Image (cartoon, rainbow, N blue to C red):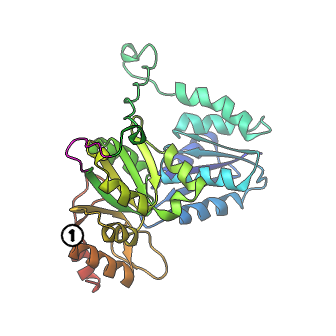
Amino acid sequence: MVGIVLASHGKFAEGIKESGSMIFGPQEDVAAVVLTPDMGPDDMHQKLLDAISTFNDQEHVLFLVDLWGGTPFNQVSRLISEEGHEDWVAITGLNLPMLVSAYGSRMGAETAVDVMKEIYPEARDGIKVKPEELQPASAAAPAAPAPAAAAVSAIPEGTVLGDGHIHYAYVRIDTRLLHGQVATAWTKQVQPDRILVVSDAVSHDDLRKNMIIQAAPPGVHVHVIPISKLIEVDKDPRFGATKAMVLFETPQDLLRAEEGGVKFPEVCIGSMAATAEKTVINQAIACDEDDVKTLKAIRDNGTHFYVQKVPSDHVDDIWALLKEKNMA
């Protein structure tokens, strides 16, 4: 029988698994894997592997995931790429009609691909409106992507666009880099022309790089670049008309950029994943002594930090949070 992994942010996967059992009865080889605020991408990756290891048949697995581009999807995508199983397949947009249909379909299907093909239209058609007369006759055509900005390489060197200085509209430290919260909530808030994911490690890792590019919101160009490239871009007047969102994986990477001459007046700390060696500061942030030392060095450069996971959250003071843990 095809195994099913339900993957989500928060407890959604656990809740929908329970709902599916109420409708279709208890199911074997079904696992709910949830991402909690204190987890990093590698933690989610391991939980997915652990879930699959409990299945009787690990060659035929269907992943039903909540959101394209979020950390659960990114780690499922990573598994599919790395593990090399021909019949591991994922669908995003997890809903209850999709799950119930999957339970019924897998009873007569041999492969996860067969189940996917059968449940996809039912999951889509499960979206209905009451009163019925308000139901759209057909799905609206997707909005055309924003016109691509002219490639900087096509602009003669020395050309000054705008005021000649790239505009850093939003800068964030986030272990998960570009994921669901950033790709949806923050890009809508900031409305950048480009997203710059700045990491030496990720820029040389084709798998992670492609996963991040896949998570890009429509109409926004995403570039995964090493720190040295950001330092070059910062000095290039051809980027003067660019409104950028910049994402760093660690404060250490951000400090290296600032030591190279890049100045950020304000930086949001979105998440710093917990490890055994780090102290948990709040649900999303964990630090060790080197992290605190690095944050202080960046602050001494004139950068103001604030803590905020999504735009609707209350803004916290990182120094007050660290002081509560006797780390400031």
Name the quadrant of the C terminus. Answer: bottom left
| Vertical comparison of 258 with 132: above or below | below
Would residue 73 be seen by someone viewing this image from the given angle?
no
| Vertical comparison of 60 with 93: above or below | below
Q: Residue at x 40, y 25 (%)?
A: 144
Task: Spot the residue most to the bottom.
Answer: 326
Would residue 271 be seen by someone viewing this image from the given angle?
yes
Could you tell me residue 274's position as x and y percent?
44, 73
Image: magenta residue range: 158-165
Asked if residue 162 is among those painted magenta in the image, a careful observer would answer: yes
**Neighbour class for label 1 at 10 Å: few (<14), some, many (≥20)?**
few
Q: Residue at x 51, y 38 (%)?
A: 93
| Vertical comparison of 2 with 139: above or below | below
Q: Total label count?
A: 1
Q: Is residue 100 left or right of residue 126?
A: right
| Vertical comparison of 151 with 8: above or below | above
Q: Residue at x 55, y 34 (%)?
A: 97
Report the front residue among 9 and 301.
301
Report the front residue among 152 and 55.
152
Residue 187 location, quadrant: top left
Could you tell me residue 85's position as x and y percent?
75, 50
Q: Residue at x 68, y 30 (%)?
A: 117
Give the amino acid at mark 1. Asp
Could you tell me residue 172's position as x and y percent?
33, 59
Residue under label 1, please give it. 317
Name the quadrant of the N terminus. Answer: top right
Determine the main secondary structure of the stretch shown in magenta: loop
Badge 1 marks a residue whose secondary structure is: loop
Could you tell me residue 129's position as x and y percent?
40, 23
Q: Is residue 235 left or right of residue 83?
A: left
